[in-house]
Amino acid sequence: MEELLATLRDSLIGSRRDAALAVTARLLEEGAPPETILQEGLAAAMIELGARWTRGEVYLPEVVAAATLFERCNDLLEPALLSSGVERTGGRVVLATVKGDLHDLGKNMVGAMLKTVGFEVHDIGKNAPVDTIVAAVGEVRPEILGLSALLTTTVPEQRRVIEALAEAGLRDSVKVMVGGAPVTETWAAEIGADGFAPDAPRAVQVALAITGR
Amino acid sequence: MDGSRIRTLGRRPAIDVLSREDLERVHSATLDVLETTGLEVGSARVLGLLAEAGAKIDPAARRVRFPGHMVEAAVEAAPRDFLLAARDPAADVIVDGSRGYLSLDGCAAEVVDLDTGARRPPTRDDLRKATILADATPEVAYLWPCVAVTDVPPEAQASYQTLIQLVHSSKHVSAMATYSERDARIAVEMATVVAGSAEALRARPIVSTFQCSLSPLMYDEGPIEAALAFAEAGLPCGFVAMAIGTAGAPTTLAGHLVSLNAELLGGITILETLVPGAPTYYGPYEAFMDLMSGGIGLAWGPEDVLFKLAAAQLARRYDLPMNIIAFGTGAKTQDWQAGAQHALSLMGVLASGDVDLVSATGTIYGSRVFAFENVLLDAELWDIAARILEGFPVSEDLLAVDVIEAVGPAGHFLDQDHTLAHMRERWRARFFGSESWEAWEAAGRPEPKDRARDRAREIVATHEPLPLPEDVERELHAIAARTTGG
């Protein structure tokens, strides 16, 4: 099993799709506990890849491709994870690109990468009105709300969402993270956001930090 | 400097980086993409009109697919020459392939404060100052709203920007940050007030725009409807694609070129099909994702120049007016990196043939931060480029054989009448330092950016743009005020 887990890690790090899916399936067939496959195989590979990215050894697309593959392997594990009754340890995250804005590449990257560290990601898409976002927070009760905006005309929506959360009495229940090309640390502080990151890998670090992980 | 309102680039050589065969492969691959994949267009109205005109529409997917002949006909319908008029006719931008014109950069999310040097969100006063600076700087031929003003509500941003541009400069105004039909109509209304009538505006369009694709392969509802609103009023509307290689376009240069070309030809096809003969231009703005951080427009390298030259070849193939991009940098200040990247990208422009419009000066940090001193530093580079293209004359007098004979071996030319008569023809730096080390130390080690900042402050404090009639200015303010409050 150790050998297969090592192969799984290598396949994920190298984004070898067929191999990663086949090894995941094989591990399950051979009776490996799904949480072991998840933790020692998939998650460990993402941690290793993150470390390599930090050292400047791999490019961002390699991390994103691995994160996408992580999700597909995780889908294979899902039924077994459910029946094994293991509690999810990661928190819930709601992600949205604010109203008036159709740019969702950055948000999607952040979503894919948050999943790899165990977060349960509820992506409510792009062009999301304030009410929809607030309703999603009320329903999902996430630890983190991530708001993306790329246009200088839509960035102010991030402030409106934070204000609406306060009016709905939900502001204290959730940490709000903001991102997008025009978004800066100063803006994040001005609108009272809890976190800001200039790129997807750092967004993961910030998400972990503000939720105390 | 000859006192002209605007300083342009003359005829430029064209360096081909693609062979004729490869150029045709890029073109036919683009037609394949437009016919097979097509574009997503967010406007049901535009999709309906395109269906009537013969495009294949999938309304559920909001997808339009163009047969090749439709694209070719649209490119054919676009005029090669048109005018971007200025309030001051001496600053007219005549788009006919013979001159290259530089614009101010657009809608930066932050500004470096001219007084304190701090990076912060821009206000209307920053845009006013920057517009005055550009009005006074001959190398800047026409204006974009160079910062996104944040001291008005977002729904009033576009109208206040156009107002400030029209009031504080008599150069041509590009309302490039106009993202909806409503904002386009407001820009047209303002331009009409200044021009005097709709007919006068049509004859001398003092305002134009360009609209952007959302890469890959999309036009959102607001921008495409804005494009039609400008074109219907007779105002030029270019198309610009800012596809980011590796993120919003393939990571290979060839694929990046195909994807971006499809977005531009698609936009031009929509416009020329629905408003035939509308003045437009082809604006490929290459940008690249930083492979490590995912940052946009921060990574600058040889691909930038290669892409420019290949895209210029495509524009020549289509005989379309072209808007090329220069002065991109990931630098955070006016340092060696910014200078080298700006100069090298400008050298790319110098080899790109009949490019009409060159964007854009004034920003650093991937076009996200506007810095006043940058405008003047870029102007100095532009002036050098313009001077290089002018070449130098040769005549009996200029060959100076008599003077060489008079001075003879081991003499000097300092006190010759010939020297005194011609030395002021030599180019002189405004911001580059050429003082001695000692003088530099004594002056507190100034850098070009320090001299440029001082000069920018002086210009902003003293330059008086050609004013608008008071009643016209009042009416513009009234129109802008109408846009606040939803």
Image (spheres, helix red, strand yellow):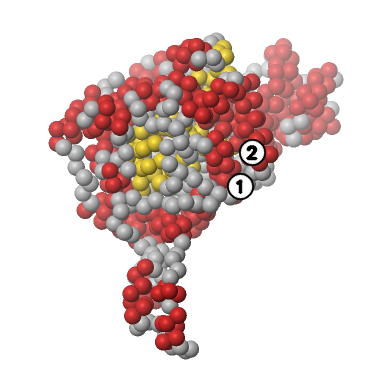
Identity of the residue drawn at 26% across and 37% down: B166
Q: Residues within 10 Å of mark 1 (few under 14, many from 20)?
A: some
| Along the viewing direction, whichever of A194 and B413 lies nearer the viewer | B413
Asked whether disc 1 touches disc 2, contact meaning CB atoms under 8 Å apart, the reply is yes
Instruction: Tell me the quadrant of the picture where the N terminus of chain B can be found.
Output: bottom left
Residue B65 in the image, given as x and y percentages of width and height: 58, 18
Residue at the farthest front position: B396
Task: Identify residue type, mark 2.
Answer: Leu
Residue B478 in the image, given as x and y percentages of width and height: 19, 27
Identity of the residue drawn at 21% across and 30% down: B196
* Residue under label 2: B23
Mark closer to the chain start, 1 or 2: 1
For residue B16, which numbered disc appears in the image?
1
| Along the viewing direction, whichever of B176 and B227 lies nearer the viewer | B227
Residue B412 in the image, given as x and y percentages of width and height: 42, 85
Answer left or right for B459 relative to B29: left
Identity of the residue drawn at 48% across and 18% down: B42
